[in-house]
Amino acid sequence: MTKIDPGDNSSVLNTDAFDKRRFTEILEMSEGLRELKGKAVMPAFEPLLGDIWASLYKMKPSITDEEVSGPLAANKQLMQAIMSDPSFESFRHFTRLNDWASAISTVKTGEKIHQWLVRQTEKDRGLRDRLRNVREQVNHQQDEPNPEALAESLEEFNEKLKQSIEFNLESFRQSMDQAREEAQQAGEWLKSLLGGSRAGSGDAELRKVPLRDKIYLAEKLSADRKLKEIADWAGRFKQAARKKQKAKQTESVARQGVTTGIDVENLLPVELSLYTHPMTKMDFLRRFSERQTMQFELNGPEPLHKGPIVICLDQSDSMRELDNQSKGFVLALMSIAKRQKRDLCLVLFSSQVRQFEFSKGDIGASQIVKLAEAFLGGGTKFELALEEALQVIGESRFKEADLVFVTDGEDEVTDEFLERFNRLKRDKAFQVLSLLIGTSPESVEPFTDRVVRVSDFDEEGSLTAFEV
């Protein structure tokens, strides 16, 4: 619809210059808001979006007591309907003073209002006619300005809209419920994609991401079913990764048996009681000085490996059905790398290769979208993938890496290549974990330190990769 200028005071809320400037910045960042502005079915939709944002973001938003007319009268009616909803104030716990949550919620609310208005004009001829009159007057104003005729058309439209809201308040509130639900779901997907491997780290991690990236990714999530599924899998796998990493940490300090020594934190309780008793204290101190006091023996596994991570992920045609799972799996591994500040390289392979490198496991919003969209297709060439991995590990910062090799196929590598690969594996001190999906281990055993067979990524065995 042709834009109507509502004047300098374009808000029906208690907004100030900061609020208006901030919304202008968010409008510039959000493709979704700009699209809504362009396809709006009613006048002054951009100021309405600004008021929706302010009602969600501000600490204490309120609707002005002043009389408004013209294009803003409809905005005031809609804002009253939004803010009088019993669920509105509780929803603001999600959006209040939260830039990205209020931006996402504004897009969703704006979309639902636009859709609701379209439905109302389709079934209510009177509303449709009055809106058409407004459009005609707006277009007519460009050639023969007639403010009185435009004001009359707007007044008739506003009155009819008020009736539509009153008579269809339940359906309007249902639309707002859907907007709130979709906004919160988008927030959860965003946390799944950008959050870390530590429990409860989602909000903290999101605060580190630029607002433009969060808005961009949230809008992509809303429109891309594939990205939503990847986010769901990423969330599930990150939970599994947390458990695996926690179990690994616990095992690394497991108490197994009794020995002698002077590690105070590992002394047996009986030794501590001897120290606290006056009759046995001197004997305890003598034995302690001679390293003869009894303590728990810490006989856990080798120190936790915190080297770089290289992932070779099969993207041949047969892996297409598992593509969303595999991307969520990779993002979970990436969250481990990010938390532990480990460099990570992802090598996608089939009959070709494509490489992504992430310093300290950090991945941006645009990189997540590129990763989601990437799929090579074609056949399976192990040697091509392993050669690419060797080149990566040849870089000094990828020395002593953990290499995770994921495939559902079979292929042969030449004896010459295998000899060189295993020699470099010893020289560069890296290890290989092969995750086989529904295939036999014979073709990967010659270059692998550990083989795990599963039917898909959601099996317990595949979670072994999260122990790296």
Image (cartoon, grey):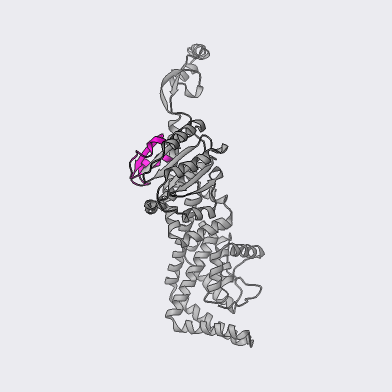
| Magenta-span inclusion, residue 443 | yes
Nearer to the camera, 63 or 326: 326
Residue 315 is left or right of residue 77, and the answer is left
- State how many labels appear: 0
Q: Residue 343: tell me if it is visible.
A: yes
- In this view of the protein, which residue sits in the foreground, 31 or 371? 371
Question: Which percent across, then down, holds residue 19?
Answer: 63, 63
Is-magenta flag for residue 430? no
Q: Give 52 or 88, whichever is nearer the viewer.
A: 52
Given residues 309 and 88, the one toward you in this image is 309
Where is residue 461? Give x, y as percent. 36, 40
Residue 190 x/y as whole percent:
49, 54
Which residues, given as a range, are shown in magenta? 437-465
Q: Is residue 218 above or below residue 1?
A: above
Instruction: Say which residue appears at 59% left-offset and 79% top-offset.
Output: 70
Q: Residue at x 50, y 78 (%)?
A: 162
Q: Is residue 304 visible to us here?
A: no
Relative to residue 362, is residue 232 drawn left or right? Answer: left
Picture residue at 48% right of the left edge, 41% below the top: 387
- In the rendered image, the quadrant that contains the N terminus is bottom right
State the image coordinates of residue 285 (x, y, percent, origin top left). 52, 13
